[in-house]
Image: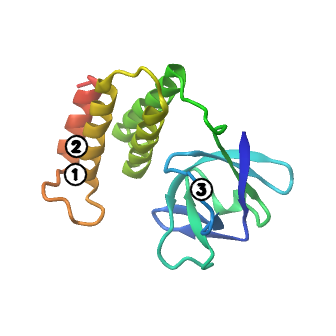
Amino acid sequence: MLQKISTVEDVFQTTGRGIIVSPGIPAKNNWCIGIGDVLTLKCPDGTELKTYLQGIEMDGAPQKNSLPLLLGPEMSKEQIPTGTEIWIEVPIKGAKVSICQFSNRFHKLITAAQGYLNGQSSLASLNGYVSLAKEELKLAKNMHPSFSDCLDEWEKMINRRWNEWGLEHNPITEKEFCDWLRAQLDCQ
């Protein structure tokens, strides 16, 4: 089921990061939204575009009652006119994730990892897919514990490479991360 998040009032192009739209997530709602979630953009002319959430902009939010959204790198400012509605797929309350749904999310993670090695995906989006898979795993029934162990390992290695806040005690180089990732994908 699609649920409307907000209607775009401002669009910002940022060098090296992508498109930021505002308002994004209303600050006073209990949204369950994660990096990598697929967003549907419904433009005023009737066009519908698909993208994903690359990040939530926490610094210098243009509106104090919302958190602006950083959209996938494939988007351009010209594609998102003022008045575009941002929608997200939300699960029905009490719904459980099937093995098939989790398998699809895991497949997207592997595809993003292959894209990262080919320079077509970012560490942020890879991290988002790991987070989403971990959340869906919590809802899934009868899943082998090795899935959780695998996702924990991926999260740990991404954090060691990303070291976003400079707090990682044992960061790794890009080469070390790519070597590890290739070994995980068994495509050395």
Give the Cα distance between marks 2 and 1: 9 Å
Q: For marks 1 and 3, give the one nearer the viewer.
A: 3
Q: Which residue is mark 1?
A: 160
Report the front residue among 116 and 58. 58
Q: Is residue 183 above or below residue 30?
A: above
**Which residue is painted at 51% across and 26% down in the image?**
104
Q: Quadrant of residue 183?
A: top left
| The one of 5 and 161 positioned closer to us in this rendering | 5
Q: Position of residue 139 (x, y in %)?
A: 49, 33
Residue 138 can be seen, yes or no: yes
Q: Are marks 2 and 1 in contact (CB under 8 Å)?
A: yes
Q: Which residue is mark 2?
A: 177
Judged left or right of residue 126, residue 101 is right
46 or 61, which is in the foreground? 61
Whole-number angstrom distance, CA of label 1 to CA of label 3: 28 Å
* Disc 1 and disc 3 in contact, CB within 8 angstroms: no
Question: Of discs 2 and 1, which sits in the foreground?
Answer: 1
- Residue 150: x, y in percent? 28, 31
Q: Of the two numbered discs 1 and 3 on the same chain, state the one appearing first in sequence.
A: 3
Q: In the rendered structure, which amino acid carries the disc numbered 2?
A: Phe
Is 38 left or right of 164, judged from the image as shown?
Answer: right
Q: Secondary structure at mark 1?
A: helix
Up/down of 144 relative to 81, above or below: above
**Residue 120 in which image quadrant:** top left
